[in-house]
Image (cartoon, helix red, strand yellow):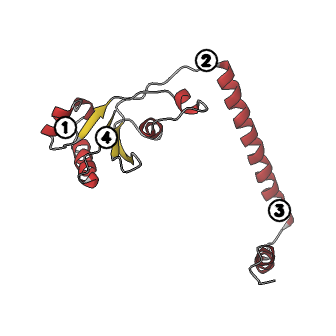
Amino acid sequence: MYASHTNGGSAANFINRIQIIAKNGVVLERIDNANQLAAAKINGAQVERLSGTRADISREGQQVPPPLSLMFAMKKGTAKTIQAGDNRGWFVVYLTDIVKGDASGQSDMLKARKQELSGILQQEYVAQMVLSAAKDVGVEKNEDGIAEVRTRLTNRDGN
């Protein structure tokens, strides 16, 4: 669920009020219309319920609403704020629930994620092996030499 504020008033005041409400244990899912926001002395805002899946975010070519994207970086029962952009106001996102999905029927998606992770793991193993080998043979960095080469390559020495 998120609330957006656009009436040109103090966004900081709006956010502060919502955060105080959340911190004081008032469940924001109970604030589901403008009348309840007005009763909480929060004017110029609207409440919308929003739900989605991780697959909604990973679909190529589709723009993901910022509040939906933010929800996947939150813990249940927490509230966060995010700017709406273009001076349109703020979103206050309160995550009410997390539903674990079942991706067993999504073989193509699972195969793609497995390939992604496999590539990342390979890179990580190579990096660890190189660091371990360098440590075993006693490789030492010449920081002054590295700085000199960096300066020459970026033409910061005037030549």
Q: CA distance from mark 4 to mark 2?
A: 36 Å
Among the two numbered marks 1 and 3 on one chain, the one whose residue lies closer to the N terminus? 1
Among the two numbered marks 3 and 2 on one chain, the one whose residue lies closer to the N terminus? 2
Q: CA distance from mark 3 to mark 4?
A: 54 Å
Taking 46 as reference, is 112 left or right? right
Looking at the rendered image, the disc whose residue lies closer to the viewer, 3 or 4, is 4
Marks 4 & 1, CB-CB < 8 Å contact: no
Residue 78 in sight: no
Percent x, y of residue 55:
55, 27
Which secondary structure lies at badge 4? strand
Instruction: Give the residue type at disc 4.
Output: Ser
* Number of other residues with Cα within 10 Å of mark 1, as a class: few under 14, some 14 to 19, many 20 or more: some
Q: Which residue in the structure is indicated by mark 4?
A: 4
Among the two numbered marks 4 and 1 on one chain, the one whose residue lies closer to the N terminus? 4
- Give the number of the disc on residue 100: none
* Number of other residues with Cα within 10 Å of mark 2, as a class: few under 14, some 14 to 19, many 20 or more: few
Q: Which residue in the structure is indicated by mark 2?
A: 104
Indicate whether 97 appears above or below 137: above
Which secondary structure lies at badge 2? loop
Among the two numbered marks 4 and 2 on one chain, the one whose residue lies closer to the N terminus? 4
Taking 129 as reference, is 105 left or right? left
- Give the number of the disc on residue 134: 3
Percent x, y of residue 47:
28, 33
Q: Residue sitting at 59 percent across and 29 percent down?
A: 59
Instruction: Give the residue type at disc 2.
Output: Ser
- Give the number of the disc on residue 37: 1
Q: CA distance from mark 4 to mark 1?
A: 11 Å
Among the two numbered marks 3 and 4 on one chain, the one whose residue lies closer to the N terminus? 4
In the image, farthest residue toward the left: 39
Instruction: Give the residue type at disc 1.
Output: Leu
